[in-house]
Amino acid sequence: MTLPLLGIICCRRIVGDAPNHGVVERYITNTAPYMNVTPVLIPATFDVIDFNALASRLDGVLLTGSASNIYPTFYGDGEEDAVGPLDFDRDKTAMALCDAFIAVQKPVFGICRGFQELNVHFGGTLSRDLVNHHAPVEAGYDEMFDFSHEVTLEHDSPLFNVYKRDRILVNSVHFQGVKRLGDGLNIFAKADDGIVEAFGGDFGGAKVNAVQWHPEWDTANNQDYQTLFKFWGEVIRG
């Protein structure tokens, strides 16, 4: 049986003197096996991609997390409010991918930055000062992902049906998050301080599912993160 094809967006970064397009490996190796899909990387080269062709051939798309922030003009703030690092090419590519996949009723998944991109795509806005949702700035890389809190799952959400309980423990590695929820999105989970941690929606048959945390981190040792990706695998199969 042929596995579904999952598109995974790349980030654009300067390596040495040259622009490169890439994905942190865990967004591939810790997602695709649990979703039971084949990953296909999509470069953040907005001007040379036929997005309709991509959406017609792939079965879904994943918008990953990233160290970069979304350019604030995408959600109505001024250019002078931009706080780097930024990745304008990825911003444009992500919005076009959302348009194309939703138009052909195929699922879009989001993790951290991808969660924020989806909120912005549907007209939402972002807060950029969530210091309580990130480890201290002096924390090491692994320590950042050890920083965690519980979220409460909404009883009418698919995540509650998947987990069969009210709360799960998640890592928290973000300074930005939902300020105003995008149109048509439903809250799936919240932190105790009211910050939206997961949402989704059905847009003309296109399923949107996104989380603010990082389920691709240490997935092999976290049954709850595996469960999320297995659920997403079911979504991509309809």
Image (cartoon, rainbow, N blue to C red):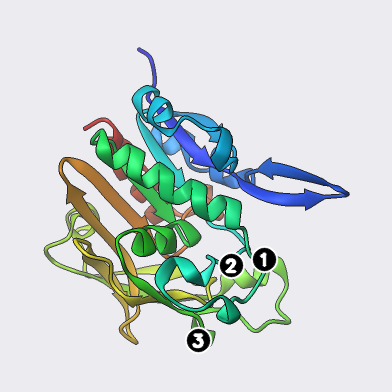
Identify residue type, mark 2. Answer: Phe
Q: CA distance from mark 1 to mark 2?
A: 5 Å
Q: Nearer the viewer, mark 2 or mark 3?
A: 3
The earlier-in-sequence mark between 2 and 3 is 3
Q: Quadrant of residue 150?
A: bottom left
Q: CA distance from mark 2 to mark 3?
A: 14 Å
Q: CA distance from mark 1 to mark 3?
A: 17 Å
**Residue 145: mark:** 2
Q: Is residue 108 visible?
A: yes
Q: Quadrant of residue 4?
A: top left
How far across and how far down the image is residue 165, in percent?
A: 21, 65
- Label 1, secondary structure: give it: helix
Q: Which residue is mark 3?
A: 132
Kindly check if marks 2 and 3 are in contact, taking CB atoms under 8 A apart as contact.
Answer: no
Identify residue type, mark 3. Answer: Asn
Residue 215 vertical position relative to residue 165 in the rendered view, above or below: above
Identify residue type, mark 1. Answer: Asp
For the point 63% across and 64% down, the residue is 86
Q: Nearer the viewer, residue 150 or 5?
A: 5
- Label 3, secondary structure: give it: helix
- In the visual, does 116 lie left or right of 138? left
- Label 2, secondary structure: give it: helix
Q: Which residue is mark 1?
A: 142
